[in-house]
Amino acid sequence: MLRSHFRCLIFGIIFILTFLQLYDFILALFSFVFDAVTDIIVKENLRLIGLL
């Protein structure tokens, strides 16, 4: 009984750690995409201002 409970606890910890790593990865990816998009927008605006 105690052994199965212990195994469940280990699986829970592994699941939480994996979820946190995945969350961190998604957050990093989102910030990278956001930076790229803002960079493109700023460059486009500067080009439009330059054309005007």
Image (spheres, helix red, strand yellow):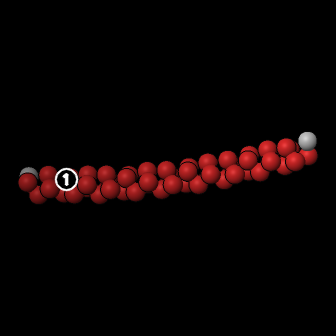
Which residue occupies the foreground of this view, 52 or 19?
Answer: 52
- Percent position of residue 17, x then y: 32, 56
Which amino acid type is shown beneath numbered disc 1? Leu
- Which residue is identified by label 1? 9
Question: Could you tell whether 15 is left or right of 32 in the image?
Answer: left
- Percent position of residue 3, x then y: 11, 58
Residue lying at 74% horizontally and 46% vertically, measured from the top left = 41
Which residue occupies the foreground of this view, 13 or 24?
Answer: 24
- Percent position of residue 50, x then y: 87, 48
Residue lying at 19% horizontally and 53% vertically, measured from the top left = 9
Residue lying at 84% horizontally and 49% vertically, measured from the top left = 47
Question: Could you tell whether 32 is left or right of 52 in the image?
Answer: left
Residue found at the far top of this picture = 52
> In which quadrant is the C terminus drawn?
top right
Residue found at the far right of this picture = 51
Residue found at the far left of this picture = 2
Numbered label tally? 1
Task: For mark 1, give the secondary structure.
Answer: helix
Which residue occupies the foreground of this view, 48 or 6?
Answer: 48
Residue lying at 43% horizontally and 50% vertically, measured from the top left = 23
Badge 1 crowding class, 10 Å Cα cut-off, few under 14, some 14 to 19, many 20 or more, is: few
